[in-house]
Amino acid sequence: MPCGLFFSKYEKDDAIFKTVWLKCWMTVLVVLLLTFPLFSQKFSEMLGLNVTNLLNLIFVYIIGAHGLNLLTGYTGQISLGHGAFMGVGAYTTGILANAGWPFWLALPAGGVMTAAVGMLFGIPSLRLRGLYLAIATMAAQFILDYAMRNWTSLTGGSSGLIVPSASLFGFTFDSDQSFYYLALAFAIMATMYLKNLARTRTGRAFVAVRDRYLSAEVIGVNLFKYRLMSFGISSFMVGIAGGLWAYYITIISDEHFTMWLSVQYLAMIIVGGLGHVLGGIFGAVFFVVLPELLRLPAEAATAVYPNIFGIFASLREMVFGLIVIMFLIFEPDGLAARWHTVRNYWKLWPFSY
Amino acid sequence: MQEFLQLVVTGLVIGSVYALVAMGFALIYKSTSIINFAQGEFVLVGAYVCLWFYSGLGLPIVLAFLMTMVFSVFMGVVLERLILRPMIGEPIIAVIMITIALATVLKSAITIVWGTQIMVFDPPIFSQEAIHLGSVRVSEVYLWTLGFAFLFLGIFAAFFKFTRVGISMRAVADNQQVAQSMGISVKKVFAISWSIGALVSAVGGILVGNINGINSALAGFGLKVFPAVILGGLESIGGAIIGGLTIGVLENIMGSYLDVYLGGGVKEIAPFIVLIIILMVKPYGLFGIHEIERV
């Protein structure tokens, strides 16, 4: 392990992976992720749940969480509408796929459509401060939710819309294992994109807008442009997540894209860490794994209290709310900050001074 | 024309309850700068607790009502102390998120305790009999609701204007530091704001629960205070009242005339469409303060 950083060139300081060790660990991680389906079967049997399925969900949520983190964590604009935006992406992709569009065209089209919708609802962001924006996006959530439910000729309403599996170059991603690679590829792309964006001119402008927007405007950052751009990119990413979700689940209905999903996305990036690339990843993992972890004590408790699965959904929501409250009060910077603290401690261990 | 009048009158009744809840919301925002996404859940908790005292324990309504008020005040103080006070000075997103999480916790707790079935006040507190006002038919319970809503609006308006506590709350809303240096305990004012916020929401919940029965969908009712306060301007209590009444009437009219074209349920989102339009045209509402910021 390196015990300190010493750069002699700016390029080195700017690099994504700053040390050789980091590169090694990243390679190990990527190799592990790529070979994972080989032993996923054993894992699933050992834990009693479908691990590949969970990982696929995690990857999809990572893309969406990165999207929201870009908007909220980097640009400082709150959105309570990302659940519905994900729905816009899912429905657009689903409808286009049903109309015979190939995967590589339908998915980006879903993203672009979502970006357009997101930017439309982002327009008030120029004139509104954080609180008002939260309310505006919440209204967007309700209006889009309503449209998804009631525009039955387009979305199939509550009976749902059936979407074919994704296929690329004649290969169909119709199993958990095959979709795993597709989702992994997109999750890695989203992560790399966010990591890279943070060190470009655009990324720095976003952070400037977040930290002090008036000062940013004074030094020549076009507020309207960057806020709208942030809404666009963020919605695009969450739309892609929605499209992937549609291809994976293959039947989508409005029930999934409610206010609750928006809240979950926000909770992900808050628990994970606002404005950290790791934040979206940790958050997505945390909130996909949490319900599964809660199921174990719930199953154990059925002996004492047989009715527990009747209230399981409510219990889960309650635990969810309590965790978010705890994090906000005791660890407002999220798991990513905790990770950095732990890592820094071990970096110099046992000679920490 | 007669149908229109009918819609306006029933809209005004629901609007008066919006106004009441919106006043609680605006009050909390004005004195603590916290936007309370759990306002709808306060409505829900108040309604259920009163129902439990009344139908469950069989207490007379006046006593059940008073006990609910005491409970709401207690809940407001406890929540402020445990959850919201640590949030003073935190970024806006953290504060918003904590009230959302609070809403989740309250709502799930209610579902665990009382389930999701619709419950009604049994026996009904006010009769449902129809009364004719000219050409408009209104059921008696609506009139009582309107009366009580305005009674409470009046009581609290007087409270802010004339009592010592009310004046100190206005002082804190105006300028926290100056108020503090004049010997007003800002912490106490915050606690009082949350209690009153919870209290008026409980009154709103009881009034609406009388009309439609209570289930967890009532929390959606609380969300409609957002259009009301945005229309009135977030900082303005008078604005919240006018906004509440307007939104009540507007949603009734839009719901009834647009349902044919948009396939039902317009009433649920009409206030939010209005909200978006207001934000685009006049973002700080009718009576809000347009903040001037410096670098």
Image (spheres, rainbow, N blue to C red):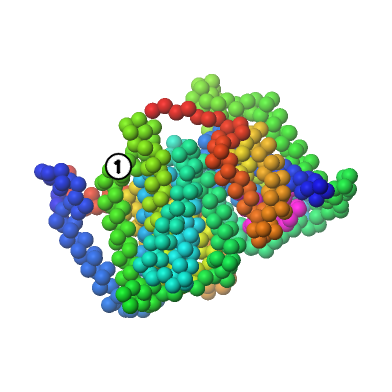
Residue A316 in view here: no
- Residue at (44% x, 65% y) in the render: A93
**B9 left or right of B68?**
right
> Is residue B218 located in the magenta-colored stretch of the structure?
yes
- Residue A155, how many percent across, how many down? 54, 66
- Residue A297, how many percent across, how many down? 46, 68
Mark 1, secondary structure of its residue: helix
**Residue hosting label 1:** A204
Vertical arrangement, residue B23 with respect to residue A70, above or below: above
The type of residue carrying mark 1 is Arg
- Residue A213, how many percent across, how many down? 38, 35
Other-residue count near label 1 (Cα within 10 Å), few / some / many at <14 / 14–19 / ≥20: some
- Chain that bears disc 1: A
Q: Residue furthest top?
A: B182
Vertical arrangement, residue A333 with respect to residue A27, above or below: above
- Residue A330, how many percent across, how many down? 40, 47
Residue range highlighted in magenta: B205-223
